[in-house]
């Protein structure tokens, strides 16, 4: 299985030839809009790829390396491309080729190695939770943590805290439904497991309310999107296969995700990675069509219970890149928000402009990342909304940090948490009604 | 590679972060949006933020005998920004401040690197627009579009870039800064320098600041799509509408090849059995006026055996427009290389031009889709090819040659809105003659005797 462009760089030729250099991608690239240099956005990066294939530039050249990693892989360019160039495939193929030639950066090697070893990764994250107070100072309320030491960073970072007990340690592996409609497997992803277990519980709550039986297998792994994005194909494939095995065992009808990156992996990444794998390729294809973001699952697969509980909030919705641009999920979260009594949705300008997170991009390219977030914060402020809703934990972290940095005193919330709150309110008022009656 | 002392001086002028010398960066300034052009790496890319910096760079280039290639967003279609003779690429992407919006004089003063759409966004709160709307409106810079005299979809009624430029600041090849024009509607002081610099493609001076005219947008509009079984009927409709004294804001045409490709790509409900469709939009300040113009257009369409669909809502209008906007992307999807021409003829010869292009396509066995601004006689024959296929590209070049011959024979011109750059330089003589070329050279040498600015574009470098 060595014929994908990820495995053989020459195979990106046809994809590259499609680019007609019109530059339309310039208008929407968050990195270009910040740095204003040709090498920052897709057209420039594709011309660098052409030069590499022609032997005019060396893939191992440090400057080339820098260009290849100065990309959020948000795929905004692809939405604006008249020629349908698969920029994401080209970028990830280049990164994979680079790793083949120069090996993985030693630090990445340690981290990605740990990701593949779920018990070790789990232990590391738990240790992180126990000791985070040493390096981080908790901010008032739920705003997160700020570093006690500046660590040489130019901008004050605010990190979300790690949960004392990860979600999958809290949750049972099977949550039965009384009037079972169907069974889903909840692919939690790392962020919900280690950082936002409350949101994961909201997902469970909403599914329970809709009589869906939920499997939450403990040995599910990281989806591997960051590993894939950094060119470590071997680890990414191993994670994909392990995840497929784990999910298969649950006997679920569908996989449900609440994270754009995890959902993208199941809907796109795994089948890309395993396309030439005779055993796992077909399995990846199978789950590709059976994985849904929870909002799609609720509104299109089942007829979800109408939210009746009142939640007073004026909110604006940020479209996570992978959720909208890869999974094409953008109407469903809005449908849900608009259905909740008391919720007013005020759209911001460019709701689908990238928030600047890009997974590890925000760590490796701090200044550009925070400048991108800064523009988002301006758009959010202009709506006058008192809450920012989104559909991906990566965006939640980035947006919350941006909100704190820009002096806006709220945190980003997942849309599922609003729905869960509405259901809870409805249950509460029903209980009260019964009490009154008694 | 330039002398490090020169790089150091450039860094002193614009700051370290605004001078690029790494090969990985230079590669990304070696081309523009023009298909089938050679590329060349510049020696250095410099990104100034002020006119004073531009002036200092010009003085340095003059002293060191370096060429300068001014560059906006590099979205032009004439090879106009490719740094053929290396030297300095002067990128205006960071010089992008909107300096003033003057609601009383209906003007905006902008730095050259301002994106056209950014200007429109900035003047929208005042209820104003800047009408020139080339296809690259969200990426192209004001400096670049002024240098190319960019056109667009509403040229017929609202004119093109040159009709909206009231003044400029230009850094001359001598290093002098020259300002002319201003906010007055009338100005006949000295030569009409706006006419000289608009469309000069960076060969006569470096535009650093622009005073642009703004207008209030039309309040009412009506869009319709007319389809025809014969190209002649479509052509006669175009001239018939103008003869009825209706000037539509938009009068666009798509030929059969384009219609079928767009329909296949975007499924917007175009009639695939039609030989041509026209997208027509009339607009104005009063509903009654727009209605009566639409009536007149409908009458002409009917007389010419056209079938018409009128947009009843904004959503339907958007759908009609989506079909037109999909023309280039749809065609571009069919093959890796898209050669987009813009030969232009008087509008009453549009039928003949469309037929001529179809014959050329047959002769050279090429796929050519033609769409464009019928009301302006400005067609975009779009040749679909693969630059990796040498034999096919040879046929493309012959077809392009013949397209230009056909346009000139019909009393037309080489380029309606893309410019000459390096792509069409060799055809100039057939339109302008020897005396025209000599005049071009004299103008060039009067302003830029050393061929420092965008050399080998528009006017061949003397001796080469």
Image: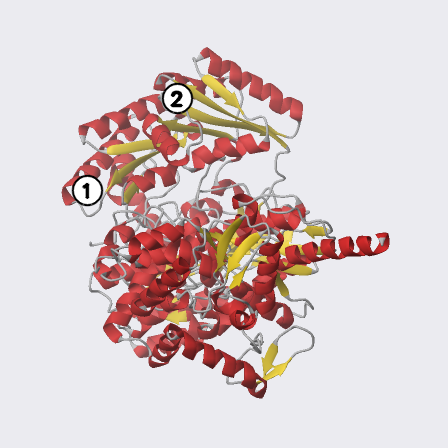
Tell me which corner region of the image, top left, top right, bottom left or bottom right, holds residue A36.
Answer: bottom left
The residue tagged 2 is B348
Question: Any mark on residue A215, and which?
Answer: none
The residue tagged 1 is B393
Q: Residue at x 59, y 42 (%)?
A: B186
Residue B338 % position (x, y):
29, 42
Residue B141 seen anywhere in this rendered image of the structure: no
Considering depth in this image, is A112 or B252 the residue closer to the camera? A112
Considering depth in this image, is B449 or B217 the residue closer to the camera? B217
Earlier sequence position, callout 1 versus callout 2 = 2
- Label 2 neighbour load within 10 Å: few <14, some 14-19, many 20+: many
Whole-number angstrom distance, CA of label 1 to CA of label 2: 31 Å
Considering depth in this image, is B412 or B76 the residue closer to the camera? B76
- Image position of A152 (left or right of A70): right
- Label 1 neighbour load within 10 Å: few <14, some 14-19, many 20+: some
Residue B423 seen anywhere in this rendered image of the structure: yes
Q: How many marks?
A: 2
Q: Residue at x 58, y 76 (%)?
A: A161
Residue A2 % position (x, y):
21, 60
Tag 1 subunit: B
Depth-wise, is mark 1 or mark 2 nearer the camera? 1
Residue B275 % position (x, y):
35, 21
- Image position of A396 (left or right of A237): right
Circles 1 and 2 on the same subunit: yes
A93 relative to B257, above or below: below
Considering depth in this image, is A362 or A220 the residue closer to the camera? A220
Identify the element where label 2 is drawn: helix
Which residue is farthest top?
B303
């Amino acid at each position: 299985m060595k014929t994908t462009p990820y495995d053989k760089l020459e195979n990106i030729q046809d994809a590259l030839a499609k680019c007609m250099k019109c530059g339309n991608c310039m208008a929407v690239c968050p990195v270009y809009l910040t740095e204003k240099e040709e090498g920052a956005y897709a057209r420039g990066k594709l011309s660098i790829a052409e030069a590499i294939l022609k032997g005019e530039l060396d893939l191992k050249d440090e400057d080339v390396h820098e260009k290849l990693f100065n990309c959020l892989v948000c795929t905004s360019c692809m939405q604006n491309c008249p020629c349908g160039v698969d920029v994401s495939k080209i970028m990830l193929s280049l990164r994979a080729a680079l790793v083949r030639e120069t090996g993985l950066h030693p630090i990445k090697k340690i981290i990605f190695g740990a990701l593949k070893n779920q018990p070790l990764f789990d232990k590391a994250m738990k240790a992180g939770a126990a000791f985070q107070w040493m390096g981080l100072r908790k901010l008032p309320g739920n705003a997160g943590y700020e570093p006690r030491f500046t660590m040489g960073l130019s901008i004050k970072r605010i990190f979300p805290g790690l949960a004392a007990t990860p979600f999958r340690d809290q949750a049972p592996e099977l949550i039965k439904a009384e009037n079972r409609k169907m069974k889903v497997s909840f692919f939690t992803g790392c962020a919900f497991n280690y950082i936002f277990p409350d949101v994961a519980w909201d997902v469970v709550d909403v599914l329970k309310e809709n009589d869906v039986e939920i499997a939450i297998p403990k040995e599910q792994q990281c989806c591997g999107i960051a590993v894939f994005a950094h060119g470590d194909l071997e680890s990414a494939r191993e994670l994909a296969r392990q995840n497929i095995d784990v999910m298969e065992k649950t006997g679920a009808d569908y996989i449900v995700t609440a994270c754009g990156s995890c959902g993208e992996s199941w809907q796109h990444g795994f089948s890309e990675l395993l396309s030439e794998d005779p055993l796992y390729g077909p399995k990846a294809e199978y789950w590709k069509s059976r994985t849904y973001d929870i909002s799609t699952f609720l509104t299109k697969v089942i007829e979800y219970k109408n939210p009746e509980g009142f939640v007073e909030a004026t909110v604006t919705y940020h479209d996570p890149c992978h959720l909208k641009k890869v999974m094409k999920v953008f109407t469903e979260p809005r449908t849900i928000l608009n259905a909740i009594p008391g919720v007013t949705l005020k759209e911001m300008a460019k709701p689908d402009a990238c928030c600047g997170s890009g997974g590890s991009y925000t760590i490796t390219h701090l200044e550009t990342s925070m400048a991108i977030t800064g523009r988002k914060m301006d758009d959010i402020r202009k709506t006058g909304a008192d809450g920012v809703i989104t559909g991906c934990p990566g965006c939640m972290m980035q947006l919350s940090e941006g909100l704190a940095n820009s002096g806006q005193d709220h945190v980003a919330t997942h849309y599922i948490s609003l729905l869960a709150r509405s259901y809870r309110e409805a249950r509460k008022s029903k209980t009260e009604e019964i009490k009154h009656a008694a | 590679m330039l002398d490090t002392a020169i790089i150091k001086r450039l860094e002193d002028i614009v700051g370290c972060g605004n001078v690029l010398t790494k090969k990985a960066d230079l590669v990304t300034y070696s081309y523009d949006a023009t298909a089938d052009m050679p590329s060349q790496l510049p020696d250095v890319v410099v990104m100034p933020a002020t006119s004073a910096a531009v002036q200092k760079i010009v003085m340095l280039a003059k002293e060191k005998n370096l060429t300068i290639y001014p560059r906006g967003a590099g979205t032009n279609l004439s090879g106009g920004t490719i740094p053929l003779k290396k030297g300095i690429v002067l990128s205006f992407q960071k010089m992008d401040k909107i300096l003033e919006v003057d609601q009383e004089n209906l003007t905006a003063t902008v730095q050259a690197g301002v994106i056209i759409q950014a200007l429109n966004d900035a003047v929208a709160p005042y209820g104003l627009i800047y009408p020139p709307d080339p296809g690259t409106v969200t990426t192209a810079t004001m400096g670049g579009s002024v240098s190319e005299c960019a056109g667009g979809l509403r040229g017929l009624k609202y004119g093109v870039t040159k009709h909206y430029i009231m003044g400029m600041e230009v850094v001359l090849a001598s290093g002098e800064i020259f300002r002319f024009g201003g906010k007055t509607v009338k100005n006949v002081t000295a030569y009409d320098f706006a006419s000289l610099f608009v469309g000069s493609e960076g060969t006569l001076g470096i535009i650093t600041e622009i005073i642009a005219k703004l207008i209030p947008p039309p309040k009412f509009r009506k869009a319709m799509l007319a389809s025809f079984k014969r190209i002649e009927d479509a052509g006669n409709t175009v001239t018939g509408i103008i003869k009825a004294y209706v000037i539509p804001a938009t009068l666009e045409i798509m030929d059969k090849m384009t219609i079928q490709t767009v329909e296949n790509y975007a499924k917007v409900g175009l009639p695939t059995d039609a030989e041509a469709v026209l997208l027509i939009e009339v607009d104005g300040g009063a509903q009654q006026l727009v209605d009566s113009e639409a009536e007149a257009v409908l009458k002409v369409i009917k007389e010419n055996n056209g079938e018409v669909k009128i947009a009843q809502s904004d959503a339907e209008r958007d759908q009609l427009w989506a079909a037109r906007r999909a023309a280039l992307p749809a065609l571009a999807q069919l093959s890796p290389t898209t050669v987009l021409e813009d030969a232009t003829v008087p509008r009453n010869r549009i039928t003949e031009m469309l037929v001529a292009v179809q014959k050329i396509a047959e002769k050279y066995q090429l796929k050519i889709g033609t769409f464009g601004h019928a009301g302006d006689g400005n067609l975009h024959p779009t040749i679909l090819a693969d630059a990796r296929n040498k034999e096919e590209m040879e046929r493309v070049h012959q077809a392009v040659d013949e397209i230009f011959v056909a346009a000139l024979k019909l009393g037309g011109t080489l380029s309606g809105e893309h410019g000459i750059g390096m792509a069409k330089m060799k055809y100039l003589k057939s339109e302008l003659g020897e005396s025209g070329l000599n005049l071009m050279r004299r103008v060039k040498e009067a302003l830029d005797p050393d061929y420092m600015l965008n050399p080998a574009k528009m006017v061949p470098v003397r001796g080469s």
